[in-house]
Amino acid sequence: MSLAEKLVSSFLAFELDIDIQSPVHSKRTKALKGFEKLGFPTKKDEAWKYTSLKSVIKEDFTIFSKKKNVLDFKNVKNYFLDNTETYKIVFVDGFFDPFLSQTSHDGIDICILSAALTKPIYSKIISKYFDTSINTNDSLSLVNTAFAKEGVYVHIPKNKILDKPIEVLHFASGNEAALMLQPRNLIVIEENAQVEIIETHQSLTKNPIFTNSVTEIFVGQNAHLDYYKIQNDRLMSSLIDNTYISQEKNSTAKVHTFSFGGKLTRNNLNYFQKGSYINSTMKGITIIDENQLVDHHTLVDHAKPNCESHQDYKGIYSGKSTGVFNGKIVVDKIAQKTNAFQQNNNILLNDKSTINSKPQLEIFADDVKCSHGCTIGQLDQDALFYLRARGIPKKEAKALLTFAFANNVLESVNIPSLKSRIKKIIADKLGVDLGFDL
Amino acid sequence: MLSIDNLHVSVEGKPILNGINLDVRAGEVHAIMGPNGSGKSTLSSVIAGNEDYEVTKGDIIYKNENITELAAEERAHKGIFLSFQYPVEIPGITVTNFIKTAINSNLKARNENEMPANIMLKKIREKAELLDIDSKFLSRSLNEGFSGGEKKRNEIFQMAMLEPSLSILDETDSGLDIDALKIVANGVNKLKNKNNAVILITHYQRLLDYIIPDYVHVLHEGKIVKSGDKNLAHQLEEKGYDWIK
């Protein structure tokens, strides 16, 4: 049985576990039908031309982990931010872990979707926002909706500036030979509120893990979101991250995606601008090697006048790794005075690595500024000699140049402990012992 | 300190240096002059260990050790410094952090401890002052958007920080106005002592008015065709290079 068939046939068992009378459930059943029709994407789909899921979905994944596994904090401590107070929402094999988490209902809601989907006090927010922004032609989002049950639920009311960042960690413990996870997250930030979120998917096992995540984010008028994704998972783990961000007037939403690990990582990052004077910013650093693949598909839908979007993705590829960047910018007819900038710069460290980079601009307005640029190159040999002539060994000099190439993406990271953690991961990834305090 | 013996060098199979002999002792300043294309920059790059150049014959002996096969960083660790004719722009690394990384790499290679931050800072301040470098300049990205003069001053600043035994200054005077030239020359003179040596690679005599060489060599078609004292430089200034060929 293929994974798609297995998913469809598991739905009955899934229904035994949930409230099928809830209005949410009709969305699930509808989504399942959609997935049944579409199946997993293949290379024949334009959006999946360079990224094949074949090697991922061939595994015999368990779709619902049977038992809850308790993790000892000291074993996973390193995946949390050091010296930084945070709210924490932690999942282990898809189950909420109350011991590792630090949630809140103190004038804000930082908790879990299973509660939000079932408790009446949340029903207003759920019916207003849940499953309202996803692409119904995207089979991966559909299959996530079909099994939507658990994940992050964050609701920050009007005028609230969150006192500390929210850390979201999804651990896979290895209790199943192969496990598929489908976290479903809903984040609602009301008018004038501000939030920082850090999301990490971390396998603790050599067993195959396949995560198909959907996150819907609603950023209210004048609100501010800073979202950081740390993708530094093990080589048997694959992640499909479908993120949908809907922004209201005057809001800012920044997403930084740091992709260093995993077997296959696909980011579908979608922005919908629903008002004027919106800022949408996407930045990313990808550093991969061996047979790793990282695919960034971004979409910015400029639907109102006077908005801007900024994209800056840096990629460094070695081994037989593959990168994909596809940046789609749509400027509607009424979206005059749009400023949309897109930059994708890549370094191939050898001749076996590949990058497929494609800007895709669909502009229907006539008074806009849109630019896109893409570069693919190698490390500058003159710069390398310059550093070595100053006594910096070859390996460190290469690492330094690589880091310098990606550095401007880190400048906009506003959490110091996060910035130093990412520098440390980059140093590890490049195999050097450098602080990169540049 | 440096002894170059019958050095032949090719780039992509094309011979550039055809039997260079040169002896530089501690405490000396040597000027290497010559027309464009005579091989001056090749000589400096080869001493510093640029792998784009292939040594086909001969040896480079430094402090009684054959360094012909050593990597650029290993030569730097032993105290060889090249001031680049065209310093490379590296966005994303500040001048200060670059020099810190360089100094600590050198200390590490010599099995010494890293330099404590306060001592490093003090030294940076001292040497920046010597070269009339503004502290704002030190937090800018390395050479990025620097004027020609700033780049050259930054090279000499690095030399001051690294305190090499042998400094090769490749066309350090080019791109400098007279004031900047005086500052740079003054910096080099202050760093000069009986234990170190300097090789000045230059096209013009002008720098040699400020840094007085003990020896002047003329390079032509990859060979030293004439050597003398500082008066040779004056002769070249008057008569050009044609009479030597």
Image (cartoon, rainbow, N blue to C red):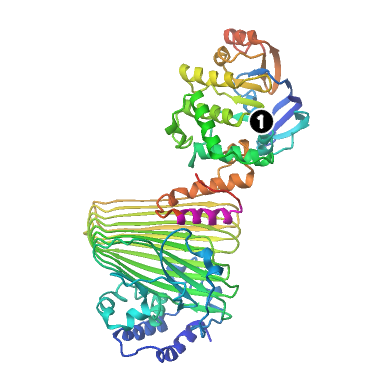
Q: Position of residue B66 (x, y in %)?
A: 77, 32
Comparing A314 with B244, the one in front is: A314
* Subunit that carries the residue with mark 1: B
Q: Residue drawn at (58%, 18%), measured in percent from left and top?
A: B189
Identify whether A33 is placed above or below A414.
Answer: below
The secondary structure that most of the magenta stretch takes on is helix
Q: Residue drawn at (63%, 14%), measured in percent from left and top?
A: B213
Q: Position of residue A171 (x, y in %)?
A: 50, 72
Q: Quick check: can you spot residue A43? A: no
Identify whether B92 is placed above or below A293.
Answer: above
Q: Label 1 sits on what residue type?
A: Ile
Give the residue pinned by disc 1.
B80
Magenta span contains residue A347 = no
Q: Position of residue A149 (x, y in %)?
A: 39, 81
In the picture, residue A229 is in which quadrant?
bottom left
Q: Residues within 10 Å of mark 1 (few under 14, many from 20)?
A: many
Identify whether A262 is placed above or below B68.
Answer: below
Q: Residue drawn at (36%, 82%), measured in percent from left and top?
A: A31
Residue range of the region highlighted in magenta in the rendering: A417-431
Q: Position of residue A153 (x, y in %)?
A: 35, 73
Comparing A19 with B34, the one in front is: A19
Disc 1, SS: strand
Comparing B235 with A365, the one in front is: B235
Q: Is residue B229 left or right of residue B146?
A: right
Magenta span contains residue A419 = yes
Identify whether A192 is placed above or below A14.
Answer: above
